[in-house]
Image (cartoon, rainbow, N blue to C red):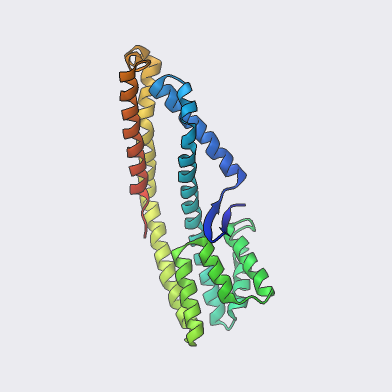
Amino acid sequence: MKGFKLEHGVHLYTLTMKELFWIIIQFFVIILAISYLFYNSFFISIMMLPTFYFYNKLMKKRHKKRTQRLLSLQFKEVLISISSSLQVGYSMENAIKKAYKDLEQVYDEKQLIMVELEGMIQKIELNIRVEEILQDFSRRSEIEDIESFTEIFITAKRTGGDLISVISNVVRNISAKLTTKEEIQVVISSKQMEQKIMCTMPLGMILYVRITSPQFLEILYGNLFGGLLMTLCLVIYAVAFYLGLKIMDIEV
């Protein structure tokens, strides 16, 4: 199961074996395609094997952001449930338990938020303070909204403020922010698809020429000048692809 763990004080996103397997498959497909299209030599793919370190690092980062985005949306449902429970007189500990029961109607037990809530409930049963539980959750998730909620909750409880009112305001603000994120994601989803299509077009064009008129590209293969030229094109393509990913990575 995917998730976050705290190891030696460093936050690490744990890939499942299935996710790691598909990353490896994708990497080999990419380097084989590059070797064939840009150099007409599969021997180049062997030389490119060390680049797996950087590809794996990039994919782990993307997987982590995707999971954090999903966890943020799920956490919004938790906040709404907790806020409702507090308003009718539940303690924070019981509100967390109630949130788990409420979300059982929406998510299956393998969803990350359900795993986290189950872990919180187990810690509550062991008489661990809810402040420590939330701090651990926010530290491992590395999500700003969860960290903000935790800090505000702990401050309000220590200062003896109106906990129900404070949490209601926090829930309202975080929910509005997450709703805005969802709306932005919907707007840019089509642009992200366009970006993916544009990134695959150069490779598609080279493949088309190689299949239909291979003689046009023969001059670029098997010689130093052609190799350098194709390497330059590959670098430009890689930079453009990376910049496209950064442009589409909008933070709210």
Residue at image position (38%, 57%) is 183
Residue at 58% from the left image edge and 39% from the top image edge: 21
Q: Kindly give the residue lying farthest to the front in the view shown.
A: 8
The residue sitting at 67% across, 77% down in the picture is 127
Could you tell me which quadrant the C terminus lies in? bottom left
Q: Is residue 190 visible to the viewer in this orientation of the structure?
A: yes
Note whether 103 is above or below 242 in the view shown.
below
Q: Position of residue 147 (x, y in %)?
A: 47, 68
Q: Position of residue 225 (x, y in %)?
A: 30, 19
Q: Is residue 210 above or below residue 66?
A: above
In the displayed orientation, state which residue is furthest to the top: 215
Can the viewer see residue 74 in this picture? no
Which residue is at the far right?
A: 126
Does 162 appear above or below 46? Answer: below
Please state the horizontal and vertical placement of residue 170, each as a whole percent of the image. 44, 74
The residue lying toward the viewer, choosing from 34 and 227, is 227
Q: Position of residue 102 (x, y in %)?
A: 60, 68
Classify residue 252 as left or right of residue 27.
left
- Which residue is nearer to you in this view: 175 or 154? 154
**Count of numbered badges drawn on the protein:** 0
Horizontal placement of 234 versus 25: left or right? left
Residue sitting at x 59%, y 81%: 91
